[in-house]
């Protein structure tokens, strides 16, 4: 294998695929990145794969001779990132593919690789379902839900985002047991689709979101699904991921059908007030109290931390129903507010101990954010 390519493009490709390289590999080759040069197409393909998540991308290269080799991802990435971006990079391997020389204007480096045939093949979906998705709709769905997935590996199904496709409609949902984020996106699919539901790890979907968000073009993203595996294709980049097996919780039944109390506030003002009060709340347990006063038309946000101090802010609001005092983990509330669009939001609840729902005031149906209150002793 011998080729010449751009340092900047090679560095960007290595940064991308390295996110799928195993940090604690079960086999030495999984700590490597696969490089495949094709003289016919004039492309260099790079692949990282940890057996759960796979990322593949390619870049233009002047290929003298085709071939494939795997090299240590971390070492190669650190060398390439420090080379001058004004000099092209030459990569050449011996016939056995175990010794690779990397040459730049400033010098040369030799690295020991491993044969490409030891690298596991990326799963390809050949006979499954193919969906064509609007790129902006997919990014919006992921940004609105990824943050609410669980980080607890013991709750494996909750470490993912549940995607449900039907007709041309996409619904994305995630929960960690303390909060629930649901976004409905009409016309997300290019073609009508029979009902299909799949839960994918948040780690994989973060890479999909990154890939699609940085993609310049109006072409749809293609998602292939088959028997425990999903492949997402966007331009010359590919992300493969296993699915999370099991029945995702019936989250719709968690959302109350009606509410006796509604607080409508300016979203940015609410975020700013919560962030200021959170400085105190963060000192102990992140708990803030939100109290409505129907006589004054104000909502008070407060934190009281024993042996530290207390603070409160008041905001004008449109209130309906009786006054209420309810407490939340401030971080959960802020995450939901920042994932929303629109200037006005509604906080709807029934009692200080039952779930509260946040949504945009002008569009309560598309994004629903449910958060469990914290029980407080007066």
Image (cartoon, grey):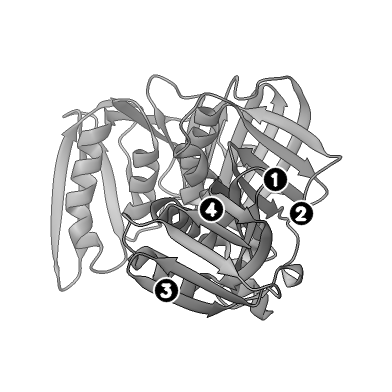
In this rendering, the answer to whether 198 lies above or below 278 is above
In this rendering, the answer to whether 117 lies above or below 140 is below
Kindly indicate the quadrant of the structure image that contains residue 315. top left
Observer-nearest of 324 and 272: 272
Q: How far apart are marks 3 and 1 (CA)?
A: 37 Å
Q: Residue 123 carries which label?
A: 2
Q: Are the two marked residues, 3 and 1, in contact with CB atoms closer than 8 angstroms?
A: no
Q: Which mark is residue 149?
A: 4
Which element type, helix, strand or loop, lies under badge 1?
Answer: strand
Which element type, helix, strand or loop, lies under badge 4?
Answer: loop
Which element type, helix, strand or loop, lies under badge 3?
Answer: strand
- Residue lying farthest right? 127
Location of mark 3 (residue): 108
The mark nearer the N terminus, 1 or 2, is 2
Left or right placement of residue 337 versus residue 117 in this view = left
The mark nearer the N terminus, 3 or 1, is 3
Q: Are the two marked residues, 1 and 2, in contact with CB atoms closer than 8 angstroms?
A: yes
């Amino acid at each position: 294998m011998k080729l010449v390519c751009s340092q900047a493009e090679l560095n960007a490709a290595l940064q991308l695929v390295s996110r799928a390289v195993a940090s604690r590999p079960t086999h030495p080759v999984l700590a490597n990145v696969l490089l495949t040069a094709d003289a016919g197409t004039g492309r260099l393909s790079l692949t990282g794969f940890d057996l759960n998540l796979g990322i593949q991308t390619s870049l233009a290269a002047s290929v003298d001779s085709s071939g494939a080799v795997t090299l240590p991802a971390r070492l190669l990435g650190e060398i390439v990132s420090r080379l001058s971006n004004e000099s092209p990079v030459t990569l050449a391997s011996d016939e056995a593919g175990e010794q690779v020389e990397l040459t730049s204007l400033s010098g040369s480096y030799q690295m020991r690789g491993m044969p490409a045939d030891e690298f596991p093949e990326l799963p390809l979906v050949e006979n499954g379902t193919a969906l064509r998705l609007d790129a902006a709709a997919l990014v919006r769905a992921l940004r609105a839900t990824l943050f609410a997935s669980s980080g607890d590996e013991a709750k494996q199904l909750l470490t993912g985002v549940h995607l449900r496709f039907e007709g041309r409609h996409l619904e994305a949902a995630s929960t960690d047991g303390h909060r629930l984020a649901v976004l409905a996106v009409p016309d997300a699919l290019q073609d009508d689709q029979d009902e299909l539901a799949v839960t994918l790890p948040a780690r994989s979907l973060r890479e999909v979101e990154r890939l699609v968000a940085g993609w310049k073009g109006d072409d749809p993203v293609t998602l292939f699904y088959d028997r425990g595996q999903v492949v997402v294709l966007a331009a010359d980049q590919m992300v493969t991921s296993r699915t999370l097996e099991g029945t995702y919780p019936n989250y719709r039944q968690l959302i109350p059908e009606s509410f006796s109390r509604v607080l409508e506030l300016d979203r940015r003002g609410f975020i700013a007030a919560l962030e200021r009060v959170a400085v105190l709340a963060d000192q102990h347990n992140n708990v803030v109290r939100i109290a409505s006063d129907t006589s004054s038309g104000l909502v008070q946000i407060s934190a009281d931390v024993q042996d530290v101090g207390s603070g409160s802010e008041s905001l004008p609001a449109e209130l309906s129903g009786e006054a209420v005092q309810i407490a939340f983990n401030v971080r959960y509330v802020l995450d939901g507010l920042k994932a929303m669009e629109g200037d006005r939001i509604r906080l709807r609840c029934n009692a200080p101990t039952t779930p509260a729902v946040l949504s945009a005031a002008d569009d309560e149906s598309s994004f629903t954010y449910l958060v469990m209150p914290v029980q407080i002793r007066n």
